[in-house]
Image: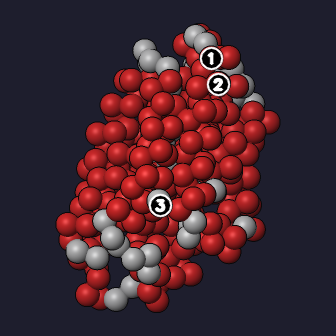
Amino acid sequence: MSLLNAVVLGVVEGLTEFLPVSSTGHLILASDLLGIAQTGFVKTFEIAIQLGAILAVVAIYWRRFLLEPEVMKRIAAAFLPTAAVGFALYPFIKRLFESEMTVVATLFLGGVAILLFERWYGKRGVLGESNLTKMTYRQAVLVGLSQAVAVIPGVSRSGATILGGLSLGFSRAAITEFSFLLAAPTMAAATGYDLLKNYGSFQASELPVFLVGFVVSFVVAILAVTSFLRFVRTHSFVAFGWYRIVAAALFYLLAIR
């Protein structure tokens, strides 16, 4: 993998990690379009650069992590279901990463799901509960179970979390912030576990590639998080639903057929 490829994938990761479009799916398909072979290093690289996006969330929300223990308790409760599912299904999940058709199908179906959800949910996302401390632990676990569906490549972690929270009556802005906060332990655990399992696939000569992807992901993710939060205060997710459908069709035509 070249440094230019690392920059491109870092941009893709930073832009898509916190949007309801599936960063993993975009990374897999972007690698295919760039002609990057899915070696052990590349698969781990695509997960490891999420560390940059994690630090972006920590940099933006460090006060909430340190000063809002009640919200952090709910983050912990939501994290547990995802951790259990991810640990139990790790070998199966890694095999799914090899299927481009799985990514295309889940991108398309996720787009349809967003459009149907917005048609049913309407403007209630603006009027929903905005105080995260009023989230019950049962609701937090249900949000975590929603997020767990995103172990399937192409299913957006943020999208699943946000739709799950909206269905429980939380506002778009509140559940989007909750999704950002929940991303930190979720992505840190997934990345750390994958690195422990596959650290042997890294060589010293490949460290610059990893560092470039990491830094680019961090910078782009900061911009994406702040911009997306402003967007959801006044817009629905319909545009993301149509984007997923169009992206699925393009990826199918360009990368698979």
Tag count in the figure?
3
Q: Earlier in the sequence, mark 3 or mark 1?
A: 1
Number of residues whose C-alpha sits closer than 10 Å to that of mark 3, classed few (under 14), some (14–19) or many (20 or more): few
* Residue displayed at 41% across by 28% down: 229
Q: Nearer the viewer, mark 3 or mark 1?
A: 3
Disc number for residue 256: 3
Q: Are marks 3 and 1 in contact (CB under 8 Å)?
A: no
Number of residues whose C-alpha sits closer than 10 Å to that of mark 1, classed few (under 14), some (14–19) or many (20 or more): few
Task: Give the amino acid type for the residue marked by disc 2 in the picture.
Answer: Leu
According to the picture, the residue beneath numbered tag 2 turns out to be 116
Residue 15 x, y percent position in the rendering: 35, 45
Residue 26 x, y percent position in the rendering: 43, 53
Instruction: Tell me, yes or no, if residue 100 can be seen here.
Output: yes
Task: Give the amino acid type for the residue marked by disc 1 in the picture.
Answer: Arg
Q: Quadrant of residue 159?
A: top right
Task: Give the amino acid type for the residue marked by disc 3 in the picture.
Answer: Ile
According to the picture, the residue beneath numbered tag 1 turns out to be 119
* Residue displayed at 60% across by 57% down: 102
| 141 with respect to 35 (left or right) | right
Q: Are marks 1 and 2 in contact (CB under 8 Å)?
A: yes
- Judged from the image, the secondary structure of the residue bearing numbered disc 2 is helix
Instruction: Tell me, yes or no, if residue 183 can be seen here.
Output: no
In the image as oriented, which residue stretches furthest toward the front?
Answer: 257
In the image as oriented, which residue stretches furthest toward the left?
Answer: 4
